[in-house]
């Protein structure tokens, strides 16, 4: 990873909407699933996943067998992580409210959970049970009554689902799991098939085809976000341990060759030590090839004049994750305006948040932390305004309402008020 001066650092914000060919493929898949339903899902399993499946839904026996295929330590860690995540999200719950006005009117807001939500969980050659917890638990806390998982069947040895995903689903209380992935899974959730009833919202990460499919069906259903490659900024001073800094940069870089990992520091000795440590740690990293390409092409060690300049640059980047590895991290916290998750101090490594601490790891990427937030309980509720106008309130305010309606040329709106005013005023005489 190169050391560059802040003046030489180019802030590139690339939003990936896929190639024309990828978009055309996604459109074709979605229309085929809409037209053919389950038959299309079976055919795409053969074509894309290279497996033959005879049923889409995972049965109870597969859930039971999954526990025999995972370590007890994994289950113990998963349960504690789930407890932490649930406790954190419980604090986000909102309440409905009503406000009684002096004139007898009542204004308020009713909070209701979404009814049915679909979680996309990556599968195939990789397993992300943490994604199950992070998406399912806030939905449950919100009160969603039906939560369904779609995840690709294994591409190695049959049409089974990774047992770690099934155990995570079972521990989350989710029993409706379907072995279908890719754009076809998104289409099935959005439009429904004979086997998979349609949902109200789709959440969860996936590859470019999943992201494009979510973008395509938005409006038919709600979605969480169109996520780009994961990213991190480490803002550090002389007090930071270069071993920790390098490890945290590589932890993010190993995700994807497109994942940016950036160090911002005013300390040249730290920058040089981290550069050497990155080279050393890369040699022993199992996903070395991915991390090496990512750090070489997307990463940077940026030497700033001051900590203040580092903070300004961090806010301009608006990272998904930012670590404050400085002597006084809480002093900098109020100045970090744009970030999905903020990690303070040398022991708050980003994987703590990815897996265990409690806050959600579904975060805004690609600089969208400038205007969006982590996945939360709010993403699984809907709000209805409540308006009860009293006779007194209408008599007092009706003329102003009619004025505004007629200013906009909507005479029908004005007359809906006028007929009431005329009747009430006449009867009161």
Image (cartoon, rainbow, N blue to C red):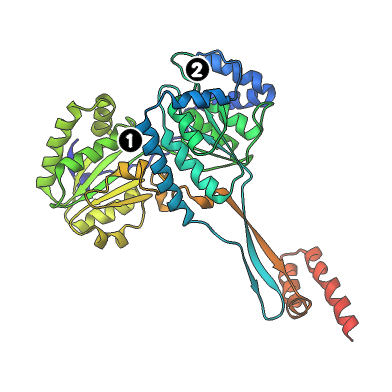
Residue at 52%, 23% in the rendered image: 62
Location of residue 274 in the rendering, given as x and y in whole percent from the top left corner: 15, 40
Residue 392, quarter of the rendered image: bottom right
Disc 1 and disc 2: Cα gap in Å? 26 Å
Q: Quadrant of residue 259?
A: top left
Query: In front: 209, or 44?
Result: 44
Is there any visible trace of residue 58 in the rendered image? no
Tell me which residue sits at (35%, 57%) in the image: 337
131 on left or right of 251: right
Q: Is residue 386 above or below residue 140?
A: below
**Residue 193 badge:** none
Which residue is label 2 attached to? 49
Other-residue count near label 1 (Cα within 10 Å), few / some / many at <14 / 14–19 / ≥20: many
Secondary structure type for disc 2 = helix
- Can I make out residue 302 in this image? yes
Instruction: Report x, y in % for residue 250.
Output: 25, 35
Decide: is 306 above or below 8: below
Name the residue beneath numbered marker 1: 259
- What percent of the width, then of the height, locates residue 23? 53, 28
Horizontally, is 41 left or right of 396 in the view?
A: left
Give the mark, 1 or 2, whose residue is nearer the N terminus: 2
Does dot 1 land on a helix, a strand or a loop? loop
In this figure, what is the number of numbered marks? 2
Relative to 353, 386 lies left or right? right
Q: Which quadrant of the rendered structure holds the C terminus?
A: bottom right
Please identify the residue farthest to the bottom as the structure is shown.
Answer: 429
């Amino acid at each position: 990873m190169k050391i560059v001066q802040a003046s030489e650092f180019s802030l590139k914000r690339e939003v990936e909407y896929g190639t024309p060919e990828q978009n055309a493929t996604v459109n074709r898949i979605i229309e085929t699933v809409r037209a053919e339903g389950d038959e299309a899902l079976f055919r795409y399993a053969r074509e894309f996943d290279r497996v033959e499946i005879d049923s889409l839904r995972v049965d109870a026996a597969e859930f039971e067998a999954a526990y025999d295929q995972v370590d007890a330590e994994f289950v113990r860690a998963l349960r504690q992580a789930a407890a932490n995540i649930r406790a954190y999200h419980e604090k986000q719950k909102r309440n409905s409210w009503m406000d009684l006005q002096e004139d007898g009117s009542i204004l308020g807001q009713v909070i209701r959970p979404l009814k049915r939500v679909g979680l996309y969980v990556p599968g195939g050659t990789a397993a992300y049970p943490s994604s199950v917890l992070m998406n399912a638990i806030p939905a449950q806390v919100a009160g969603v009554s039906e939560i369904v998982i779609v995840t690709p069947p294994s591409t190695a040895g049959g049409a089974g689902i990774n047992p770690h995903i099934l155990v995570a689903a079972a521990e989350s209380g989710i029993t409706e799991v379907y072995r279908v992935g890719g754009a076809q899974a998104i289409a099935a959730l959005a439009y429904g098939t004979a086997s998979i009833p349609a949902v109200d919202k789709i959440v969860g990460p996936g590859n470019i085809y999943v992201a494009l499919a979510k973008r395509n069906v938005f409006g038919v259903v709600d979605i969480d976000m169109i996520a780009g490659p994961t990213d991190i900024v480490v803002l550090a001073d002389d007090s930071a341990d270069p071993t920790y800094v390098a490890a945290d940069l590589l932890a993010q870089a190993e995700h994807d060759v497109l994942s940016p990992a950036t160090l911002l520091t005013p300390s040249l000795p730290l920058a040089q030590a981290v550069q050497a440590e990155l080279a050393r740690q890369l040699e022993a990293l199992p996903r070395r090839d991915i991390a090496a390409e990512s750090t070489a092409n997307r990463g940077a060690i940026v030497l700033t004049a001051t900590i203040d300049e580092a903070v300004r640059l961090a806010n301009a980047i608006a990272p998904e994750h930012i670590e404050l590895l400085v002597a006084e991290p809480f002093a900098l916290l109020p100045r970090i305006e744009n970030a999905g998750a903020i990690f303070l101090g040398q022991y708050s490594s980003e994987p703590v948040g990815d897996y265990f601490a409690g806050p959600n790891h579904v975060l805004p990427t690609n600089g969208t932390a400038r205007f969006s937030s982590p996945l939360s309980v709010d993403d699984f509720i809907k709000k209805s305004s409540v308006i009860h106008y009293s006779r007194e309130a209408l008599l007092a305010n009706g003329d102003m309402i009619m004025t505004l309606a007629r200013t906009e040329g909507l005479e029908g709106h004005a007359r809906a008020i006028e007929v009431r005013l005329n009747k009430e005023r006449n009867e009161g005489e």
